[in-house]
Image (cartoon, grey):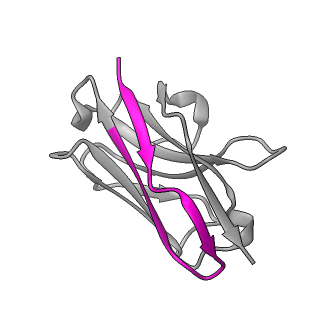
Amino acid sequence: QVRLVETGGGLVQAGGSLRVSCTASGRTFSNYAMGWFRQAPGKEREFVAAVSWSGGIRIYADSVKGRFTISRDNAKNTVYLQMNSLKPEDTAIFYCAARRVINVSYYRYDYDYWGQGTQVTVSS
């Protein structure tokens, strides 16, 4: 079992930056690919970014490319999502997810463990 805890959400003005973190416990973190998803009110949960076990492969949703950066620190069992140039449409609950393989995926059903989420609100 893997437990994921997200931190770092909050309120930021449009154009600002925020970093959310996800710390894992329970299993060998470096064996897992990690992802970030988000869910806005009334919408489906959607893929944001993912990183392979080594950090060598990173993938992004088109809507965040060039603005968001995913990274991981296996020594700290933590994955990060640095969000720059935030827009009001980025407002959502951001969820961290872990996949029991080393490769990345865009698909939410490929992930095995989920955090409780952290709210990110971008004001205009």
Residue visible at 60% across and 72% down in the picture: 12
Where does the image place residue 51, in percent across and percent down from the top left?
A: 38, 50
Q: Which residue is most to the left?
A: 75
Q: Quadrant of the N terminus?
A: top left
Vertical position of residue 111 compared to residue 22: above or below: above
Q: Is residue 103 visible?
A: no
The residue nearer to you, when weighing 31 against 123, is 123
Q: Which residues are magenta?
A: 1-23
Residue visible at 84% across and 44% down in the picture: 42
The residue nearer to you, when weighing 95 against 31, is 95
Vertical position of residue 115 compared to residue 58: above or below: above
Q: Which residue is most to the top?
A: 1
Residue visible at 51% across and 48% down in the picture: 36
Where does the image place residue 55, in percent across and percent down from the top left?
A: 28, 53
The residue nearer to you, when weighing 65 against 21, is 21
Q: Quadrant of the C terminus?
A: bottom right
Q: Which residue is most to the bottom?
A: 15
Q: Which residue is most to the front?
A: 11
Q: Main secondary structure of the magenta part?
A: strand
| Residue 37 is one of the magenta-drawn residues | no
